[in-house]
Image (cartoon, rainbow, N blue to C red):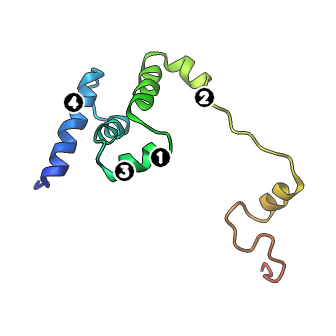
Amino acid sequence: MHLTRQAERALKTTFLEAKLYNSTAISTAHLLLCILRNENDPTTKLLNKLKIDYESVKDQYTAMITNEDDYIENLPKAEFNDDASQEEGARDGGFNNPTSGNKTNKKI
């Protein structure tokens, strides 16, 4: 398989990330860590604006693999409001339904 130099470098760095954690397989977490290592990458810059950086992802991943049971129990839980507007949205077919709330479109 022919890869660009950048793709080949990314795969090698991803492999090294996996090796740091004594992983026998490369996961998406390793790929994300690889991307975040390159501070000049546009994807990294975007993720950094969203407060996602190498150190925080590394800490989360380390916590996940060392204390998996505790980590899963402490994940944030989804919260739902019981507003009438949300209930109506659910009855109309969900969040991104273009017909929900639009009384001119008739359902068949």
Lower position in the chain sequence, tag 1 or tag 3:
3
Q: Amino acid at mark 1?
A: Lys
Q: Is residue 70 above or below residue 11?
A: above
Q: Any mark on residue 43, and which?
A: 3
Residue 61 percent coordinates (x, y): 42, 27
Residue 7 percent coordinates (x, y): 19, 50
User: Do callouts 1 and 2 mark residues in contact (Cβ within 8 Å)?
Assistant: no
Q: CA distance from mark 1 to mark 2?
A: 23 Å
Q: Amino acid at mark 4?
A: Leu
Q: What is the tally of numbered marks visible in this picture?
A: 4
Quadrant housing the C terminus: bottom right
Q: Amino acid at mark 2?
A: Leu
Check disc 2: other Cα within 10 Å, few if <14, some if 14-19, many if 20+.
few
Q: What element does badge 3 sit on?
A: helix
Q: Which residue is mark 1?
A: 49
Lower position in the chain sequence, tag 4 or tag 1:
4
Q: CA distance from mark 2 to mark 4?
A: 27 Å
Q: Amino acid at mark 3?
A: Thr
Please state which of residues 95 and 51 is positioned toward the viewer in this rendering: 51
